[in-house]
Image: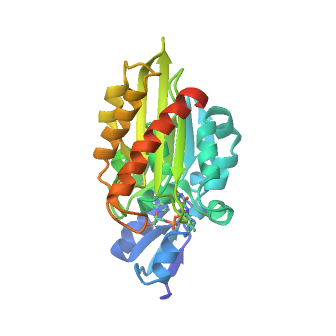
Amino acid sequence: MRPFRLYEPTTINETVATLSELGDDGKLYAGGTELLLAMKTGLLQYDGLVNVKTVPELEGVSYSNGTLTIGARATHSTVEHSADVLAHAPLIASVEHRVANVRVRNVGTVVGNLCFAEPHSDPGALLLLYEAEVDIASPSGTRSVSVEQLVVGPYETSLAGDELVTRVRVPLLPNGMRGAYLKFGYHHRPTLGVGAAVSVTDGKFLDVRLTLGSAPPKPTRMRDAEAVLRGAAVDDPAVAIEAGRIAAEGCDAIDDLHGSAEYKRHLVQVFVQRALAEAVERGVK
Ligand SMILES: Cc1cc2nc3c(=O)[nH]c(=O)nc-3n(C[C@H](O)[C@H](O)[C@H](O)COP(=O)(O)OP(=O)(O)OC[C@H]3O[C@@H](n4cnc5c(N)ncnc54)[C@H](O)[C@@H]3O)c2cc1C
């Protein structure tokens, strides 16, 4: 790997000032599980890396007033084992438990995962279920965007070069809503992730959120499929089949090493139905 200088700021202000000074020659670095691999293979080259792990303000997971906060330094393992996550959003803990392997989970961060925007990932589709937002700092101030707006395409985010994601804010699912997340794949990374969150009244879907990851080029909320479910009978299998069909048609799947676009659309069709059934029968917060 080409030599680089490692910067170790201790505050958010110092971090974004360093990024701004380095311009295109610098990049933020958290667990390094994506970035260092890309640098080792020569796909990416930077003269300076700015370490987010030396900034105490970016540490930890916390809960307050119906919202979980995941700091930029929080690893997948931290989130998986957090008492706040286990108590208030056990679905997130269970999905984090199935990300990668224990070595990657111990160093890789949830925020680093979102910011690398590798399509074959879990946190994006999972956090879309919760309508999560990220807080962003830069030398000119702070702003917030939804996770949906953060990831704009494969390996592409809406972040400027001098912006740092400081935390993800995750509102709990509304009262009565329960969710499920199913993933499928046979490589290291997922081929498909489907999230479903539902509330049911009098045998009908009252509200529904459906999300897809890995098969589409970016984590995606399947709003057209949600629309056919709202108000429909939970025990009518035709409704879930129709939702799966709409999600499959709208998912923009492409041919790649995980399979053909046609194969992925078939998986989407099947897994949307399974995720809905799981959310209805065994869904958790
Ligand atoms: C073998 C293997 C298996 C995997 N399996 C899965 C899987 O099953 N599911 C899954 O979802 N993922 C999987 N992954 C991906 C893994 O989740 C990510 O590699 C990890 O979360 C990235 O986090 P990191 O802290 O290492 O990021 P880094 O490599 O440090 O950074 C990644 C990118 O994010 C940017 N960045 C980091 N922090 C910030 C910040 N605070 N603000 C702005 N930009 C930032 C960096 O500049 C860089 O561009 C796997 C990875 C490996 C190697």
Q: Nearer the viewer, residue 53 or 223?
A: 223
Task: Examine the rendered structure and indicate whether residue 34 appears above or below residue 112.
Answer: below
Could you tell whether 130 is left or right of 148 in the image?
A: right
Q: Position of residue 19 (x, y in %)?
A: 41, 67
Task: Examine the rendered structure and indicate whether residue 155 appears above or below residue 285.
Answer: below
Image quarter hosting the C terminus: top right
Q: How many marks?
A: 0
Q: What's the coloring here? A: rainbow
Could you tell whether 75 is left or right of 251 in the image?
A: right
Residue found 37% across the figure and 64% down from its top:
155
Q: Is residue 153 visible?
A: no
The picture quadrant where one finds residue 259 is bottom left
For this orientation, the residue located farthest to the bottom is 2
For this orientation, the residue located farthest to the top is 202
The picture quadrant where one finds residue 115 is bottom left
Q: Position of residue 154 (x, y in %)?
A: 35, 61
Q: Nearer the viewer, residue 228 or 267?
A: 267
Residue found 50% across the figure and 52% down from its top:
122
Residue found 50% across the figure and 60% down from its top:
112
Q: Position of residue 185 (x, y in %)?
A: 52, 58
Residue found 43% across the figure and 81% down from its top:
47
Q: Is residue 42 visible?
A: yes
Q: Position of residue 38 (x, y in %)?
A: 46, 76
